[in-house]
């Protein structure tokens, strides 16, 4: 498709060019709308029908259940690549060679040391502080230790900033968890891979050896890959919006973390576990709650089923379901909450009400199960999400800066009072 679209206002017609993406997505390019119409704008709350940018990073087709990073199917990446390969792909556009991947990992490890003064900032938070607030603050605080702005026209400076945050962010995430758990801070082991080292930083107990579990490492690797990017969602759009003011990478990422914190975004897997705990407290009758979910007059909502973007199925859920099954079998956990989850899953996959409406378990449902099985508290679920989303945020920020996109400045339709005179306080 090509050509123009015609808009008629008060009998006058205006033509706007049509833009077609490489996957045949069609958009009407209206950047000149206000100028040619003398002030007319569009109104699209939530921007559900508005493209904020052109991007070559992630393709998502919710109707067909398709998710691709740089043209690679998420199914193939989850099966054949590790998280660091996917991070490199998202950020730099191509899968790395063996030499490029080794250098990337080596450079990240060299940048993983966090300044000792950061521990003082962490100590300033009460142990009960929410991990997302702590993580956002620590990420923002990195600016104080790295005050010079990145010259985005320098590939060397851009690369250094990227490996720096890729090295330090897992440390900050693990420290956030250990602070809450009352454990001493740990730097991990440089001899381990990126994901394995993170697991060690998280779970190594004092005076005991960290035991590697290949199934757990594999599941965590897949979880991070599946969360690595998801097109122009709330937090990603926030990173691009903040970065459009030429704010630095760390400041933009901190803003993205804050956006991810919301329960409608990154907090969805936490909501799943909270729902399961509520069902357990009420006796654990899954059939009762499935009936409540089908009752339009009942306020109960089944968390972790269906997706606002995927209208058919969540392709990530198919992948992580297998990993969740493997983790539960490997760890041999006896947990009534997880039993309830498996019961809800089984009934939803067999109940025609859910099948006909394509209300299948989504990635948040299974990620919550995995995190709980690993002993990760619900408050840490969203920081884990942030760790996975980190390379996507970096890639989006880098793309926005390299494309020299203009500062974000949405319009509004004013619905307040018209001009009125000021009243003296005695006459109000």
Image (spheres, rainbow, N blue to C red):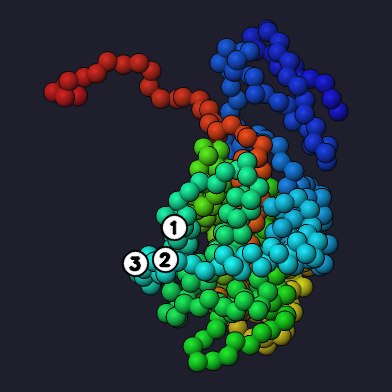
Of the numbered discs 3 and 2, the one sitting upstream in the chain is 2
> Measuring 60% from the left and 50% from the top, which residue is drawn there?
157
Q: Secondary structure at mark 1?
A: helix
Q: Which residue is mark 2?
A: 118
Q: Residues within 10 Å of mark 2 (few under 14, many from 20)?
A: some
> Measuring 77% from the left and 25% from the top, which residue is drawn there?
18
Q: Which residue is mark 3?
A: 124
| Eye-nearest disc, 3 or 1 | 1
Residue 315 point in image, percent of width and height: 77, 59
Q: Secondary structure at mark 3?
A: loop
Q: Is residue 330 above or below residue 142?
A: below
Considering every residue shown, the one lying at the far left of the view is 426
Q: Which residue is mark 1?
A: 145
Residue 165 point in image, percent of width and height: 56, 59
Would you say 183 lies left or right of 238 here?
left
Would you say 210 lies left or right of 261 here?
right
Is there any visible trace of residue 385 in the rendered image? no
Q: Quadrant of residue 77?
A: bottom right
Q: Is residue 70 above or below residue 120?
A: above
> Measuring 68% from the left and 67% from the top, which residue is drawn there?
105
């Amino acid at each position: 498709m090509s050509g123009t679209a015609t808009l008629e206002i008060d009998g006058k017609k205006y033509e706007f060019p049509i833009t077609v993406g490489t996957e045949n997505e069609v958009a009407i390019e209206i950047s000149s709308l206000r100028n040619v119409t003398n002030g007319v704008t569009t109104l699209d709350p939530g921007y559900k029908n508005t493209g904020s940018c052109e991007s070559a990073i992630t393709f998502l087709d919710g109707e067909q259940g398709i998710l691709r990073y740089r043209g690679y199917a998420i199914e193939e990446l989850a099966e054949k690549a590790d998280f660091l390969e996917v991070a490199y792909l998202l950020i730099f556009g191509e899968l790395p060679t063996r030499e490029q991947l080794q250098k990337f990992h080596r450079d990240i490890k060299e940048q993983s040391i966090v300044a000792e003064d950061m521990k003082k900032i962490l100590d300033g938070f009460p142990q009960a502080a929410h991990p997302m607030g702590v993580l956002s603050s620590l990420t923002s605080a990195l600016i104080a230790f790295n005050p010079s702005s990145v010259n985005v026209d320098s590939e060397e400076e851009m690369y250094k900033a990227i490996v720096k945050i890729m090295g330090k962010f897992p440390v900050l995430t693990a420290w956030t968890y250990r602070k809450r758990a009352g454990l001493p801070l740990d730097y991990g082991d440089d001899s381990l891979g990126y994901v394995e080292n993170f697991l060690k930083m998280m779970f190594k107990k004092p005076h005991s050896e960290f035991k590697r579990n290949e199934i757990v490492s594999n599941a965590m690797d897949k979880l991070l890959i599946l969360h690595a990017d998801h097109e122009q969602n709330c937090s990603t759009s926030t990173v691009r919006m903040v970065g459009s003011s030429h704010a630095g990478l760390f400041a933009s990422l901190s803003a993205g973390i804050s956006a991810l914190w919301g329960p409608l975004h990154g907090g969805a897997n936490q909501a799943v576990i909270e729902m399961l705990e509520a069902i357990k407290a009420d006796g654990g009758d899954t059939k009762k709650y499935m009936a409540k979910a089908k009752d339009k007059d009942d306020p109960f909502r089944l968390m972790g089923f269906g997706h606002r973007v995927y209208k058919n199925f969540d392709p990530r859920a198919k992948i992580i379901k297998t990993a969740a099954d493997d983790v539960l079998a490997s760890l041999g956990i006896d947990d009534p909450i997880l039993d309830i989850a498996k019961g809800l899953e089984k009934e939803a996959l067999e109940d025609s009400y859910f099948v006909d409406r394509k209300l299948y378990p989504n990635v948040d449902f299974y990620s919550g199960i995995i995190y709980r099985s690993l002993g990760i508290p619900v408050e840490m679920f969203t920081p884990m999400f942030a760790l996975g989303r980190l390379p996507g945020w970096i890639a989006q920020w880098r793309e926005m800066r390299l494309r020299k996109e203009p500062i974000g400045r949405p319009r509004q339709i004013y619905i307040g009072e018209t001009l009125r005179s000021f009243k003296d306080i005695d006459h109000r």
